Image (cartoon, rainbow, N blue to C red):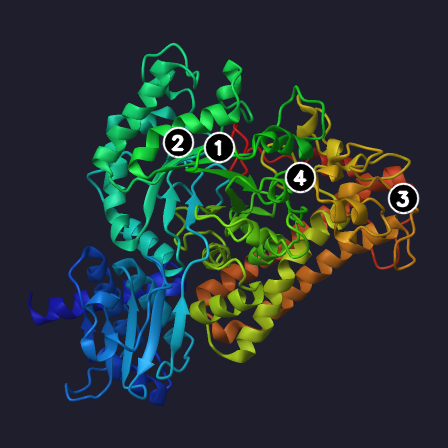
Amino acid sequence: MNFKKTIVFALFILLTFNSSAQEGYDLWLDYKKINELEYKEKVSSYFSNIELIGNSSTIAAIREELQIAKAGFEFKNHKSGTSNKLIIGTHNNLPVSVKGEIKTDSLGDEGYSIIALEKGETLVITGNSDIALLYGTFGLLREIQQRNNISNLEIEEEPKIQKRVLNHWDNLDRTVERGYAGFSIWDWHHLPGLIKPEYKDYARANASIGINGTVLTNVNANSLVLTPQYIDKVKALAKVFRPYGIQVYLTARFSAPMETGDLETADPLNKEVREWWKNKADEIYAEIPDFGGFLVKANSEGQPGPNNYGRSHVDGANMLAEAVAPHDGIIMWRAFVYSEDDPDDRAKQAFSEFVPFDGKFADNVLIQVKNGPIDFQPREPFHPMFGAMPNTPLMMEFQITQEYLGFSSHLVFLPQLFEETLKEDTYANGENSTVAKIIDGTLPNRELTGMAGVANIGTAKNWTGHPFGQANWYGFGRLAWDPYMKAREIAREWLRLTFSNDEDFVQPMTDLLIDSREAVVNYMTPLGLHHIMATGHHYGPGPWVDNLSRPEWNPVYYHNADKKGIGFDRTTSGSDALSQYAKPIEEKYDSPETTPEKYLLWFHHLPWDYEMKNGKTLWTNLALHYQMGVDQVKEMLSTWKKMEQYVNEQEFEKVRMLLEIQLKEAKWWRNACLSYFQKFSDMELPAGVPEPEHSLEYYKSLEFPYAPGISPSWN
């Protein structure tokens, strides 16, 4: 290559890199140039003298990540005589001179230690496995990205949850159910031959936040993925992910023995069926020895399951658990079940179906429970199952993709929602029996623990559609690693890694992120309202929908608005769903006066003129909350407009335009919902709440047949 061509090629690489950063592809791993000269000089000296011990594929991944970071930070090469040194190695392999000063006995297989020795001249990353070293390396880079002093570090971290998993609702045709960032990143047609660079970058991003598993396919499963042709494709992805500590999982369609195995039944107690699943597990593990296991959605929303044969969820889950147990595999069995044939409150049905089987599931079964008893709403009380199954490992399921929160059009910082759920007290074992303690195995003591997040990732150049959707992916990973982290801490961290360390940016934007979730609750479902989104696509308001084939698919089922009032009575005078919670909660929430107002209409049907704590009527408060949500989005937009100097032009403009959309749609929500509910309340809008711009019939006439994420198989 001649000199001219070399210059052209270099410019091409530089422009490509800059374009990638501009569009957000690098996520929180955008190792920006360090301009603080004194800090840069000190930190770069460690990178000039690195002792990386080992030769595994994970060690190679660490070496590559350090090189990427070194180039991004623009560290210069110091002379070989520099005194500072960075040592990375498992504890068994550390040099004798430093080995005795560090203990890793309590760190398990994934925990790491970063410690400065010899007055800061030697920095050591260690642990008990190469994967621990990878996590520690990302931990160190996170410190550097935030410009923290690394010469006096003394960090010791281990994950509090064992299985930290992304659930992809991706179909084999590359559509993504409830996906708002384009198509699936898994190019099944070209696998296993074509390995796209995105696969490796996906693994890097997940490893950097401690995610160690990925379910590649939709919970509305396709049995084709269990055939040899597709197992070969999954094997190729597993090979890419393995150096980054990420296991692959697949969804198992319960009827697969009939659809791909020529059996006439999928009865879990049938000998041939059990043998089919054992053989299938053996086949998969022969190709993918570290395969994680299966995620199963059964007897829910039309999906086949053990109930089809008069069998229980225990029968189905334990059959699959038996098949993967010899390979140390697990079964994640979803508790998201409700039936059109069950007239009971939908919020009660999962509890009723699963709690009687507490303690009867196999040891390698995790029951995967959504954070709330309905379906990933902007706000729900925690699922009562978390306080009622002490003898069964329960796995939290959060939704990172914003199915009910404005898709990728709206800025909503979901770690605030996640934290709210995790710190709720279940009273399962007395006071301070938080949801976090249930799922991390503290209450009761157990080893198999898990947290799942429904991914918001697609083929969008920035992975998530909305630039701030990345914060929800990031925040999920951080909370899966440590469910006691605070959302505010995560927000600050992500902002500093992704955009800027300038406090004039970080502080106002942290406040914006923390307030954003409450804003969406206010302009969509305030005071405990829930599931009043438009039908099918769940985009925009639809509180008037009452014509769907199943009652629990209709928003009117949930808000029960009439001339007398609004809300769902879940006390003893109604569905009695409240009795599924521990006594302290049941007693507190039984009265509207002592129920937290954020859950008021979740548990109570109240008159429109019911006087609330501020002395104003329920109707007035409802209307003011809708207006508050609109005002909060206005404030978000105003704040963002002041941040232009801290972000690149492309991302600034994209977020600005999306916030304009969000403001427009917040007003739509306010106007449509208040127009509809006002016909029942027959009360005037309070001062400060404008009259709707259009008639109720106009709002009811709006249709969105091609809204993204639509699927006939709802989740």
Using the image, tell me which numbered label, if any, was put on residue 321: 2
Image mark count: 4
Q: Secondary structure at mark 2?
A: helix
Q: What residue is rendered at 56% in x and 50% in y?
A: 443
- Decide which of tag 4 and tag 2 comes sooner along the chain: 2
Q: Which three-letter amino acid code belongs to the residue tagged 3? A: Trp
- Decide which of tag 1 and tag 3 comes sooner along the chain: 1
Q: What residue is rendered at 69% in x and 52% in y?
A: 521
Residue hosting label 1: 361
Left or right relative to 270: residue 386: right
Kindly report which numbered mark, 2 or 3, lies closer to the viewer in this rendering: 2
Residue 414 in picture, x, y percent from top left: 57, 55
Residue hosting label 4: 533
- Decide which of tag 2 and tag 3 comes sooner along the chain: 2
Residue hosting label 3: 608
Verify CB contact (< 8 Å) between mark 2 and mark 1. Answer: yes
Q: Which three-letter amino acid code belongs to the residue tagged 1? A: Phe
Distance from Cα at disc 2 to Cα at disc 3: 51 Å
- Decide which of tag 1 and tag 4 comes sooner along the chain: 1
